[in-house]
Image: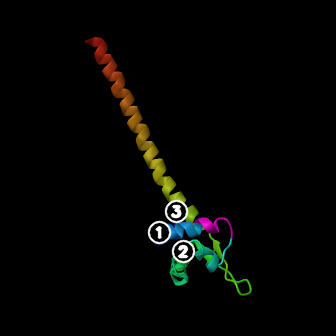
Amino acid sequence: MPSPAALDATFQALADPTRRAILARLAQGEASVMELAAPFDMSQPAISKHLKVLENAGLISRGRDAQRRPCKLEAKPLAEATGWLIEYRKYWETQFERLDDLLGELKRLEAMAGKNN
């Protein structure tokens, strides 16, 4: 189970569409800051701020390759957030099953009442 602080950092990082787009790009493979900045109409320092948020959340890491510092997707925080969401999905599935059972019982009682009238 991830810590509340780790989940907060992950969801905060994922709340921004630019950061989600950066993660989608990194899912295809490592990229430099310049490569990550290319599709966006924003300055490199602005992209670097987004990368810092992603790095602080543990969603990316930066390596060193000669003059390049390629960024790489780190999937562990995403897997932890997905696991957290799956627990709530199980809760809601159980609630919907109970609602289906109740609606089925109400329909059965309504049909019985209709036969008796």
Q: Nearer the viewer, residue 99 or 58?
A: 58
Residue 27 among magenta residues: yes
From the top left corner, tell me how far across and down residue 115 is, in percent. Answer: 31, 12
Residue positioned 33% across, 27% down in the render: 106
Residue 49 visible in image: yes
Report how far apart the C-alphas of labels 1 and 3 lie in the structure: 16 Å
Which residue matches tag 3?
81
Which residue matches tag 1?
16
Which residue matches tag 2?
54
Badge 2 element: helix
Badge 3 element: helix
User: Farthest left residue?
Assistant: 117
Residue 74, picture quadrant: bottom right
* Mark 1 nearby-residue class (10 Å; few <14, some 14–19, many ≥20): few
Report how far apart the C-alphas of labels 3 and 2 lie in the structure: 14 Å
Magenta-colored span: 24-29
Q: Amino acid at mark 2?
A: Leu
Establish if 57 lies above or below 116: below
From the top left corner, tell me how far across and down residue 87 is, in percent. Answer: 49, 54
Report how far apart the C-alphas of labels 2 and 1 lie in the structure: 10 Å
